[in-house]
Image (cartoon, rainbow, N blue to C red):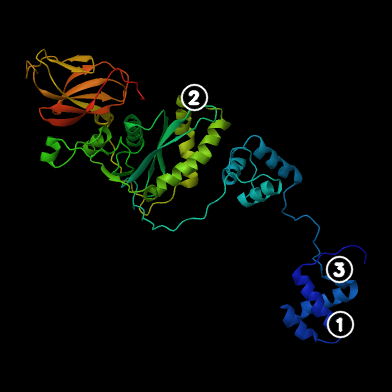
Amino acid sequence: MKGTICLSNKEVHRARVLDRVINGQLTLKRASELLDVTYRQAKRLKERFAQDDVAGLAHKSRGRPAANSLAEKIRSQIVTLRQEKYSDFNDTHFTEMLHEVEKIDVSRETVRKILRQAGIAAKRRRKPPKHRSRRERRSQPGIMIQWDGSPHRWLGPDQSPCCLMAAIDDSDSKLLAAILVPVESALAYLMLLDMVARRHGVPLSVYQDRHGALKRNDDFWTIEEQLAGVRYPTHVGRVLQELQITAISAQSPQSKGRIERGVGVLQDRLIAELQLHGLTDIDEANAWIEKVFIGRYNRWFAKQARKPESVFQKLPYQQRYNAITFAYEAVVANDNCVRLGGMEIDIPATRQRRTWARAQVLVKQHLDGAWTVWYKDQRIARHPATELIEPIRSWKRRGKAKTAQQVYVSSKPAFG
C-alpha cells in the first residue's frame, strides 16, 4: 500500500504482537492477553493485519471529521466574534455571551480550543493558588456582608478612573449592590449601604478593610475618649452603630478574599460589558448595572447558602432616610440658629420649648443633600438641600486638650 500511515503507540504495539503471531512465535490466546482484548477481537485484528498489513490496524475514522464536530462556518464565526465584538472578554465570559446573545451553544473547552488554534491567547494567565486557611462561610444570608471599593478605569481606557463600590453576602457570594463613584469615600460607603438596605435589608455585621472612611487609623485619643474608653467613630462607623451592624476589620486582603475575588471577576467582566454597550457615562452605567448586570452576575456566580432563610432586617423608608446620613455635633446659638460651615439653620420655637439656645444638637445631611437638626430623637428643624461634601477630620483645641471632630467645610470640593 502506497502513502504514509501514522500509527499511535497502541497500534504500533499491536503490529509487533500480531507479527509474532503470524510468524508462529506467539499464540493468538497469549496475544489477546498482551493486547488486553478478547480472543474474538484479537482474531479480527489478526485478519486485518494479514490482509492490509499495518494499514489494517489504523482507526477506520482517522482523517474523517467527527460526527459532533462544529461546522467550519461556526468556528470562523466564533473566532471573528472574539476578535471584534468580544475582544475584551475571557473564555468563560465569551462562552456565556455566545449562549445568551449569539445563540451559539458550545462548551467553554470547545471555545478555548478554537481560540488557541486560531492563535488568540487567553486574556490573562492563571496563577497557581497559594495555600491559605479557609474561613467557613456564614450559614445564612444577612449574617455578614463584605464590602470594598476598587479604583480602576471602569468606563474604558479613554475615560477617567473611577471607583466601583461593591457588597457581597458572605454566605452565598451574592452581589448585593454595586455602584460607580468618583472615589472611595465615606459618601460612597453610605450610598452603598443605602442600596443594600433598600434592596435586601440591614445585615447583622459587615467585614471590611481599614479604609479611613470606615475606621479611624490615627493614634490620637481625646480626653473625652479616654474617659469613655472608646474613640469616636467615623461617619460610616456611627451609622453602622446606629443600625446595630457589627463592623469587623480584616487584618489582610486575603482574609476578605471573597470580596477581593468578586471584584476581580467584576474587573474582568463588567469593563468588557460596559464597553460592549457603549456606556461611558457614570449615571447611565449605574442604572444599567442595577437593572441588568447584578442579576446576571448572580445567576452565574451566586452559591447556595447552607440555610436559605434571610436574616436581613427590612427598614421602612423614613427610618433608612434618617439613619444613613452624615452627622455633625453643634451648639445652638443665642439667636436660635445653628451655624455650620457658613450655613445658617434657624430653629423655630415650639409649644414645649420656646428657645433652643445653648442646646446640644445633631445636624444631619441626608443622601439627597437635605439637612435636618435633631435634639435627642426629635427633629426640630429642616434646611434645603446643598451639595454633598465629604467631611474632614480636624483637631480642635479645647483648653489644654485637643478634641477630634468631623468638620463640614462648605468650600471643600465634594470629592477632594
Q: Find the residue positioned furthest to the right.
A: 2
Is residue 213 or residue 51 the one in the foreground?
213
| Mark 2 secondary-structure assignment | loop
Front one among 40 and 394: 394
Q: In which quarter of the view is residue 362 placed?
A: top left
Q: Are marks 1 and 3 in contact (CB under 8 Å)?
A: no
Q: Which residue occupies the extreme front position in the image? A: 400
Q: CA distance from mark 1 to mark 3?
A: 16 Å
The amino acid sitting under disc 3 is Ala
Q: Could you give the CA–CA distance between mark 1 and mark 2, rounded to whole angstroms?
A: 79 Å
Q: Which residue is mark 2?
A: 281
Which label's residue is closer to the chain start, 1 or 2? 1
Q: Left of 60 or right of it: where is 401?
A: left
| Residue, disc 1 | 22
| Residue 332 place in picture, x, y as percent | 12, 19
Q: Is residue 37 something that shows in the picture? A: no
- Give the side of residue 400 with respect to residue 302, left or right: left
- Image: 113 above or below 367: below
Mark 1: which secondary structure?
A: helix
Reading the image, the residue beneath label 3 is 55
Q: Residue at x 81, y 58 (%)?
A: 63
Measured as percent of width and height from the top left, residue 65 is found at: 78, 54
Q: Residue at x 28, y 18 (%)?
A: 410
Left/right placement of residue 87 relative to residue 175 reads right
Question: In 3D space, how far apart are the residues under numbered discs 2 and 3 (Cα atoms)?
Answer: 66 Å
Q: Residues within 10 Å of mark 1 (few under 14, many from 20)?
A: some
Q: Which amino acid, mark 1?
A: Ile
Residue 15 position within the rendered picture, expressed as x and y whole percent measured from the top left? 81, 75
Is 242 situated above or below 261?
above
Q: Vertically, is 69 above or below 316? A: below
Q: Which mark is residue 195?
A: none
